[in-house]
Amino acid sequence: MDKKIVILGCMDTKGEEYSYIKRHIEKTGLKTLMIDTGVINPPAFTPDITRHRLAETAGENFDDLVEEGPTRERIAPVLAEGAKRVIKKLIEQNDIHGIISCGGTQGSTLAATVMRELPVGFPKVLVSTMASGDTSNLVGIKDVTMMFSVSDIMGLNMVSRQILSNAAGAICGMAQMEGEEAETARPLIAITTVGITTPGAMKAREVFESAGFDTVVFHAVGTGGRAMESLMKEGKINGVLDLATIEVIQEMLGGYLAATPERMTVATGLAIPQVICPGGITCNTYGPPESIPEKFRDRKMVRHSSLYTNVRTNEDEMIKLARVQAQRINPARGPVEWFIPMRGFCSYSVKGGPFYDPDTDRVYVETLKKELRGDIPVFLRDLDINDPGFAVEIAEHLVAMIRNKR
């Protein structure tokens, strides 16, 4: 089957650049589908999908929008919404196999808005003047490949020609690269972890792999939990070992690894089997010591690296965390089990570690048991979270839960 690449962008102000990308993609034998999101002037050539069709798909009339005032601030979100709907349908029909765009702040914003809605694994390349800075608001939690344009995207020159041809080559290579179907056909288990729970995660992964499951591990630093739950919504996750629920306490306290209030609710709502542990909840994370808010500066601290410092959570915070986690899990429609390693929730909180405080940890456990729905089991183990015995047991329990559900 011939592969086809979507070229998305303003065909009025950047028609020359998109024509150049189109030629280079078609040199490889791939086809192209040009989608125009221009607002100001007529397109430099006739696109395959017009701005009028995008607006109509989003429930608007493009000419009416222009009469209201031809501003990108008003029209661009409409075109982005139309492009999302058109492109997602084409993906479902297997009619397209990659997407590429280029732009400055406005063009990158529109293209990234569309790309963030597309499935993980679908090839996405964005050449942008913004790619050398903080791109978190553009990439979000999706696999958008950004390439710095070096020069502004305004006409072809010795720099832009090379950059755009490289980008065209990148998207063609991605689209033509075949995945390993044998691996993706296996049931998939998601694991959350951070550095201070890594040994436990690695051992659990061994158990899952031996039992015939594939695994995907998420670094629980805010984006990791969100990415995991995005894949759940796409129907790709069969079970969850939520080993490191650190993102919830960080959300509550304003730490650097904060997730959103949706964290720990998605598997619950989708009835996905899950085993939950308190990995890393003794830590609230900031940057260098001088970045730590004044109210936390009298706490025990650990320099996790030159860039990050962990602050020990206290009793009141652990009580509140237990209540919040229970509230998010209690509506669960699927099987849930909670495992608590009483000898330490991370490598810092074991006996002799800098965050060792068993009395505070015990208050968390007592609150959790009281607040959780009565039929959700809480298993206490006289082990730490990185003990191989603990990791093996929680992994085996999750395997049994998934098999019983199937």
Image (cartoon, rainbow, N blue to C red):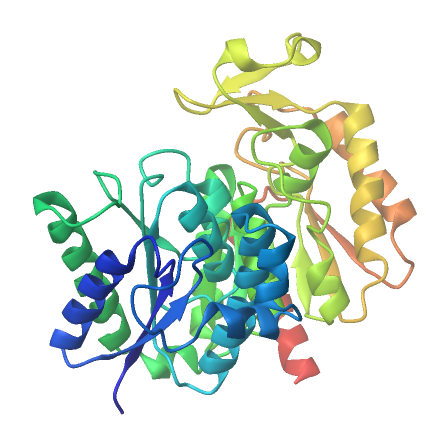
Q: Nearer the viewer, residue 122 or 68?
A: 68
In this rendering, the count of numbered labels is 0
Q: Residue furthest left?
A: 158
Q: Nearer the viewer, residue 120 or 349?
A: 120
Q: Quadrant of the C terminus?
A: bottom right
| Residue 159 x, y percent position in the rendering | 12, 44
Q: Which residue appears at 47% of the width and 74% of the height?
A: 87
The answer to whether 341 appears left or right of 237 in the picture is: right
| Residue 215 x, y percent position in the rendering | 46, 66
| Residue 127 x, y percent position in the rendering | 29, 51
Q: Is residue 256 above or below residue 21?
A: above
Q: Is residue 38 above or below residue 301?
A: below
- Can residue 296 be spotted in the picture? yes
- Can residue 179 be spotted in the picture? no
Q: Which residue appears at 32% of the width and 53% of the height?
A: 102
Quadrant of the image occupied by residue 301: top right
Q: Residue furthest front?
A: 67
The answer to whether 319 appears left or right of 119 in the picture is: right
The answer to whether 365 appears left or right of 391 in the picture is: right
Q: Quadrant of the N terminus?
A: bottom left
Q: Nearer the viewer, residue 189 or 356?
A: 189
Q: Is residue 270 above or below residue 229?
A: below
Q: Nearer the viewer, residue 17 or 238?
A: 17
The answer to whether 164 appears left or right of 208 in the picture is: left
| Residue 101 x, y percent position in the rendering | 34, 58
Q: Is residue 334 above or below residue 367?
A: below
